[in-house]
Image (cartoon, rainbow, N blue to C red):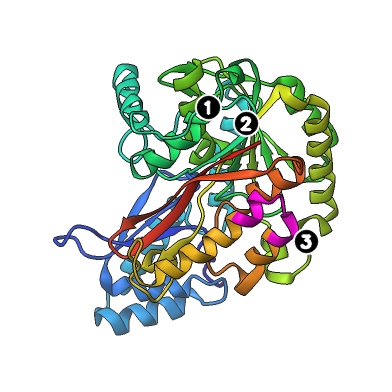
């Protein structure tokens, strides 16, 4: 019998502990809470979990690597650890996954997933102080004509200037509106739109879900809708926007949260996203809703832009605002200009260039917004690049639309 295939959506990273070298393996989907440390001699063996290689082949490889006749025990331990952690594509993983999805669907609330380092403080007083400091240097003034903003979804401490500029542009009159939040679905399937009826809980309190609009999108949006999408349980692109909105307008902001899956089929195979009939139906439904509700909605986009450097598979050591990243900035700004000019087709043609070698993880929510609100032109308030690590850079921006 062949070994089960190793899941393709796992995260791998070198151990940060010199005393415990190896490869850390974890589940970004949070189906499993396990984190495995694979010792260096066993790392090549992970490639044998391909759905074709047999246990006997694995045992032979381990013997060649370790030179120990007791490799059968090592083999069994490796298979068992991967299996029990839910890291293999088999019945064990299916049970873990289905259980997690069922748990989220049965929850009455969407609990915070990004409190702490990399996110935001748990204590409400500390959270307010931190965010007030973020807004202290914001530049834009609010304008009642503004009907939408685009903000980052990087960790707030890394993108606070763009967050502050974007949210400072929201007029006070928006407090009474429904906030349509379009966020990047980093882990969801392509050409899908994730919805949830659950209120979002943060240290500030609970949001009010726009149930009538959520139900309408579910009923009329077609097969592209993923209702009670499990990705909502751990996705940060909407959670960070919720916290900023609550900071400005109080905990009970009314929200319509939509996670937008990638339009990878269009990027890699050509054509427009709406060439997929399911995508076309959802975009049409969202556009009709936008036209009918008009100024009662305020649109908030949680998007990042380019992802460059070693972390993202590029051969370059990326440095913000230097070297290759200056050329990336020019291309980013070209795309932003197409968005500002309400040119959905021109924007998407630039995303499709080189199969989006800039790796914009906000391209799908932006395109969705351009199709839903083709009447709104944009203004760039701030553009930034941030070294998320010494060799990798993320770019993002603050925009407003009128």
Q: Mark 2 sits on what residue?
A: 146
Q: Is residue 64 above or below residue 348?
A: below
View extreme (left): residue = 19
What is the spatial separation of the Cα atoms under label 1 and label 3, in whole angstroms?
A: 35 Å
Who's the residue at 83% across and 59% down the image? 275
Q: Is residue 206 left or right of residue 278?
A: left
Who's the residue at 55% across and 22% down the image? 109
- The answer to whether mark 1 and mark 3 are in CB contact below 8 A is no
What is the spatial separation of the Cα atoms under label 2 and label 1, in whole angstroms?
A: 8 Å
Using a 10 Å C-alpha cutoff, classify the residue at mark 2 as few (fewer than 14 neighbours), some (14 to 19) or many (20 or more): some
In the rendered view of the protein, which quadrant contains the N terminus? bottom right
Q: Nearer the viewer, residue 392 or 112?
A: 392
Q: Quadrant of residue 16?
A: bottom left
Q: Main secondary structure of the magenta part?
A: helix
* Image location (x, y in percent) of residue 126: 29, 22
Q: Mark 1 sits on what residue?
A: 142
Residue 23 numbered tag: none
Q: Is residue 316 left or right of residue 269?
A: left
- The answer to whether mark 2 and mark 1 are in CB contact below 8 A is yes
Secondary-structure class at tag 2: loop
* Image location (x, y in percent) of residue 231: 57, 41
Q: Indicate yes or no whether the magenta region holds residue 339.
A: yes
Who's the residue at 83% across and 27% down the image? 292
What is the spatial separation of the Cα atoms under label 3 and label 2, in whole angstroms?
A: 28 Å
Secondary-structure class at tag 3: loop
Q: Indicate yes or no whether the magenta region holds residue 233.
A: no
* Image location (x, y in percent) of residue 110: 54, 26
- In magenta, the rendered stretch is 337-346
Secondary-structure class at tag 1: loop
Q: Mark 3 sits on what residue?
A: 272
């Amino acid at each position: 019998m062949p070994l089960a295939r190793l899941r393709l959506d796992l995260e791998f990273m070198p151990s940060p502990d010199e005393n415990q070298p190896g490869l850390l393996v974890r589940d970004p989907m949070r189906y499993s809470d396990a984190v495995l440390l694979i010792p260096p001699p066993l790392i090549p063996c992970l490639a044998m979990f391909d759905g074709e290689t047999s246990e006997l082949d694995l045992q032979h490889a381990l013997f060649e690597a370790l030179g120990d006749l007791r490799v059968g025990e090592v083999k069994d331990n490796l298979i068992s650890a991967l299996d029990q952690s839910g890291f293999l594509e088999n019945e064990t993983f299916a049970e873990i996954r289905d259980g997690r999805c069922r748990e989220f669907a049965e929850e009455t609330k969407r609990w915070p997933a990004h409190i702490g380092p990399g996110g935001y403080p748990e204590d409400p007083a500390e959270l307010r102080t931190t965010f007030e400091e973020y807004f202290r240097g914001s530049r834009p003034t609010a304008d009642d004509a503004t009907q939408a903003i685009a903000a980052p979804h990087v960790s707030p401490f890394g993108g606070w200037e763009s967050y502050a500029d974007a949210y400072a542009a929201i007029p006070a009159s928006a407090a009474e509106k429904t906030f349509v939040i379009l966020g990047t679905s980093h882990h969801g399937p392509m050409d899908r739109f994730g919805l949830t009826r659950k209120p979002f809980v943060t240290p500030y309190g609970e949001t009010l879900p726009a149930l009538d609009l959520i139900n309408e999108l579910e009923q009329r949006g077609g097969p592209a809708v993923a209702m009670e999408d499990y990705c909502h349980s751990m996705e940060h692109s909407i959670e960070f926007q919720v916290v900023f909105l609550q900071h400005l307008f109080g905990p009970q902001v009314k929200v319509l949260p939509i996670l937008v899956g990638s339009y990878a089929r269009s990027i890699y195979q050509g054509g427009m996203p709406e060439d997929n009939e399911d995508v076309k139906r959802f975009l049409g439904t969202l556009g009709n809703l936008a036209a009918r509700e008009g100024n009662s909605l305020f649109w908030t986009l949680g998007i990042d832009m380019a992802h460059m450097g070693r972390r993202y598979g590029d051969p370059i050591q990326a440095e913000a605002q230097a070297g290759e990243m200056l050329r990336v900035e020019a291309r980013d700004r070209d795309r932003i200009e197409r968005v500002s000019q309400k040119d959905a087709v021109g924007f998407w043609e630039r995303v499709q260039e080189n199969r989006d070698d800039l790796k914009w993880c906000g391209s799908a929510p932006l395109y969705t917004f351009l199709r839903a609100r083709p009447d709104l032109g944009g203004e760039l308030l701030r553009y930034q690049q941030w070294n998320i690590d010494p060799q990798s850079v993320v770019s993002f921006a603050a925009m407003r639309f009128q």
